[in-house]
Image: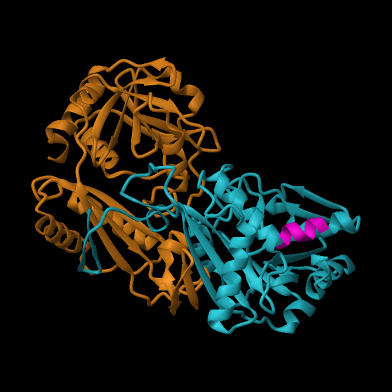
Chain colours: A cyan, B orange
Amino acid sequence: MWVMENNLSIGEVNDWSRAVQFGDGVFETMAIKDGRSQALNLHANRLSLGLSALYIPLPADDLTSLLLSYINQLVQLSGVQSGVLKIIVSRANSARGYGFNSSLKPVVTAFYSTRQEYPVSHYQDGIALQKLHTQCSVQPQLAGLKHLNRLENVLAKNELSVDFFDGVMSNYLGNIIECTASNIFFEKQSKLYTPDLLVSGVAGIMRLLIMQYCKKNRIPLSVQDINHADVASYEGAFICNSLMGAMPVNIIGKQELTITPLVRKITDAVRSGKIYE
Amino acid sequence: MWVMENNLSIGEVNDWSRAVQFGDGVFETMAIKDGRSQALNLHANRLSLGLSALYIPLPADDLTSLLLSYINQLVQLSGVQSGVLKIIVSRANSARGYGFNSSLKPVVTAFYSTRQEYPVSHYQDGIALQKLHTQCSVQPQLAGLKHLNRLENVLAKNELSVDFFDGVMSNYLGNIIECTASNIFFEKQSKLYTPDLLVSGVAGIMRLLIMQYCKKNRIPLSVQDINHADVASYEGAFICNSLMGAMPVNIIGKQELTITPLVRKITDAVRSGKIYE
């Protein structure tokens, strides 16, 4: 096929990135601290699950080693010890159609950038969440995966007002799913609740670490549908992802929330690094 | 940020394609016949609507002229008079996050390839449709748009057995939406029915042309939810897109369908070019 970009001829090519054409791939975003990731195996494991779900061959036999190799090389190249690694694995290049040849070798692209530090007050006093209109897609086969079809997050982020740190998204079924780039946990009467991600959303690594921490420390946690109309019944909440860690929520929309002892316990465990033990 | 691809260093860059990172853009696929498109204005119009819905600035004041310019240049470059133009407009390049600067200039990438001719029997005798498990996402803000988040189509195409020409997809709500790369119309008692695309699916240009043709020719047509359990109640069906035109359906799953006079009338109108008049 013949290709032109921004009115300039690129010439005749056989194929083009399927990430560009269809968002055909998955990605991971990892915090790198002092040259290493604290959740390397979990990221490698999620990457493997995502690729399998999309029938994309693994780009290496050992994904943990693959991630480690990119981390080491990029830390050395950049001279930056603590940063953010984003790694995209796309199916391959191909011609125009949706169909693909399953023997094609996937393309790995790794991006390493400096890390944004958040104000300490976000962790101490909590942050405010907007109630967003932009919905999370309902699609069971893609739910939970950190795939490259992220238009809903782009639109959600665009909807976010400067008065709020992040915004909470629901799906068409009326259930709270997550924030634009983080997962959410609620608390009521010393029990935690987090949205079931069976039909919508991204299952974050920090969410998983917190679920494991709760299990180990016998903190009651229910993974379930949380209707957006029921948010008012919760006393506390926090949001989390691999980069920010976990932050207490003090406002959702117009509803004020308390930073309860349990919310404080979890967010402190993330901040101190206990969560990785 | 520092970038590596397939273990090779690309060096330090400021940004990367948002089409790759998030599928942040839209596209059009147009049939070019004897050096021109028969639905130029409709494609330009849908492109404009899609870009507006995603808050992407138009890449030119006059999108019809923009498309025309790409068609003319690519036909000349390739020497191919009848082919397929795929044009992608992505928001821009940016750093890692979902947020974007609305002043960024979008990137236009145009691909021109030779056109696949389908066997005449597909138009005369009809084609068979598989009932697919892969679902169309439920997301009202993205529904109808020809955006770059097309993983569900990739998975649906992968599910398609070689015994079928295409497959019909439903959404989580149990409604029939479309095929992997075409829209679908049903017939019952000389009336046509096509799925409402308010929460799922892509509103195709050929679907629009057929809707306009029905209106002009007083052919009754209802755009409505069609539950997948009700498919058995229809007598005939056809599928359509800008490249194949329209093809009668003779089988959906295990159900046999008749090529009714009305199905024949519409598919013939598309084939003869009457649909463009």
- Above or below, B167 against A38 in this view is above
Q: Position of residue B212 (x, y in %)?
A: 23, 39
Viewer-side residue, A265 vs A128: A265
> Which span is picked out in magenta?
A206-212
Q: Position of residue A229 (x, y in %)?
A: 70, 53
Instruction: Identify the image quadrant of residue A93.
Output: bottom left
Q: Position of residue B234 (x, y in %)?
A: 39, 19
Q: Position of residue A135 (x, y in %)?
A: 56, 55
Instruction: Identify the image quadrant of residue B237.
Output: top left
Residue under the image location 43 percent in, 44 percent down: A103
- Above or below, A41 against A104 in this view is below
Report if residue B198 is visible in the image.
Answer: yes
**Is A19 left, or right, of A230 in this rendering?**
left
- Above or below, B172 against A189 in this view is above
**Is B170 left, or right, of B106 in this rendering?**
right
**Is A111 left, or right, of A8 in this rendering?**
right
Viewer-side residue, B160 vs A122: B160
**Quadrant of the frame with the C terminus of chain A:** bottom right
Residue under the image location 17 percent in, 36 percent down: B275
Residue under the image location 27 percent in, 49 percent down: B29
Instruction: Identify the image quadrant of residue A132.
Output: bottom right
B260 in the magenta segment: no
A210 in the magenta segment: yes
Magenta: main secondary structure:
helix
* Numbered label tally: 0
Viewer-side residue, B80 vs B172: B80
